[in-house]
Image (cartoon, rainbow, N blue to C red):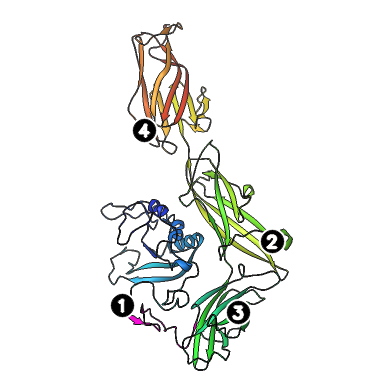
Amino acid sequence: MIIQENTIIHGDSLTVLRQMEPESVDAIITDPPYGINYVSQTGASIKNDKSPFIWFLYDAFRVLKSGESGHGGLICFTRWDVEQTFIDAMKIAGFNVKSEVIWDKVYHGMGDTKAAFAPSHENIVFAVKGKYSFPGADAGRLDGLNYPFPTILTQLDAFGRTVNVHYGPWPMHGLYWESTSADLDLFADRGDGRLPTLTVGLYPENNAVNTGQTPAITLLNEDGTPADDTLIGSTAVAAYDTASGCWQVTFTASAAGGEGVVVARASLGSYTADLTIRVGAVLSLTHDKPAGVTVRYGAPSETVTLSLRDSHGDPVTADAAKGETIGWSAAAETLADGTAVVECDAADIRAVAGQAGDFTLPVTGFAAGDSAITVTCTYTYLENGVPKRIQSSTIISARSLRDAVGLVYDVEEDTVLRTTVNGVYLPCEGTGSTEGGDVTAPGFERQTGSLYLFAGNAYTDLNDFTVDLSGLTAVDSGGNALDGTRWAIYAGDVIEADDYRYRLLTVETDQPRRLYISGTVTLRRNDVTYRLTLTNYPCGANPAP
């Protein structure tokens, strides 16, 4: 979907986002359901508010611009008690969470006057895609100059162009870095036999800068105090290159492998320029099911493809000869009683042949319901002979469907069940039985001798099925077959009771004595057909003495 300017699209965010082109959006501003089951004083509620609505984040990340195509930002409203859930989900989706923004709303309500304070603000999370910094007048280099959203103040830059001014120091004065911030990735930027390195261009702003001299580089902590060599072990400045118009400055990570933030201050004469360097290790684990995976009990498993990448987007594989290994764990949320909704096993994760960095995970349905699968990859590698580990996780939304329908009737002290789960016939009858395979006899009130077709609401909706009773036949107490003029059976309306829906199957006959009905009750829903077998169901008057 290519969106024209000044176009408003009204629709489901999960559907619309999936139709949009990658790297096509400059900014996403959203106020999703917080997952707090909000109900107003008038009884109004918010759809999808039972848990934090994080499922849009995978596609939001996909459609945002980054790198050469632009700078994409996410502004997400949230609340203090669920904010960390959104932040964690953003990171798993691939976002770089930059900061929290507080919206001072000035006014506030009474709140809970007995036990809680009412806030007068909202929490907003600002996250970006990739190595983001505010776009500059020269998008290739001055990404600290131009704020990406409209601002009250504007100013002409060094090239005479109007840019949006953001609070903070003006970055260009004699010297300026290729970007105002950069990442030294201890994982992606490592090399065979050497420590990770980062090279950044340092540019002179005008002819007043003496390019024949070499700028001095000082490493500082964020508070301006001198930094030790915990993060950056060494710095090297190459001679000024007239072709590229800059000095190439190379930073080498410390052998200590520390992670954090350091400021590189370049000085030449009276000019200075600061570069913020984030030192860390990033491993990205994503999957190909942004809308979630749907499986069905008794049906074949569905396959989820996992992709392992470094911060440069390069596939990550393990070379055993270099001491590299990949380990997996996979865990699925269960129902409140501990019942599994879906089943998956990290031992079943396999590398995809011919697709470096891609792996498959089979997921199988079990109970009916929704779940979330957390898959974690642990990558181990050697740096100067010392084992190092890096982890990344991803969350897969999973739904398991399960059609469970049955026939039930009570005779004296016995309960007779005829059930099917996804077409697997599970008969059980006599001696007070209440279980048909793993389908429990319904708890709604029943009349002894009456026949009911039922389905548990947690499994399937009986309204979805058409009922065909033409496969049933009847005999009298002497075993003589009765034709359609002597008896009839029909299904009543769907009735909801407790956790079940049921239809009463009523028999009409001109026979004074008991009938026995056998055959098949067929249920159909689109291309799904289930058959329930009935054998000698007794109905009508008692046999003659």
Labels 3 and 4: the sequence-earlier one: 3
Q: Nearer the viewer, residue 259 or 44?
A: 259
| SS majority, magenta | loop
Q: Position of residue 237 (x, y in %)?
A: 60, 84
Q: Residue at x 54, y 54 (%)?
A: 374
Q: Which mark is residue 538?
A: none
For badge 1, the amino acid type reads Ile
Which residue is identified by label 4?
Answer: 463
User: Where residue 385 appears, x then y in whole percent?
Assistant: 73, 69
Marks 4/2: CA–CA distance: 55 Å
At a point 48% along the width and 25% down the height, the residue shown is 418
Residue at label 1? 152
Kind of residue at badge 4: Asn
| The disc label shown at residue 250, or none | 3
Residue 192 picture location, percent across and down: 69, 69
Instruction: Name above or below for residue 12 compared with residue 500.
Output: below
Q: Badge 2 local density, few (<14 within 10 Å), some, or many (20+)?
A: some
- Disc 3 crowd, CA 10 A, few/some/many (<14, 14-19, 20+): some
Q: Which residue is mark 2?
A: 324
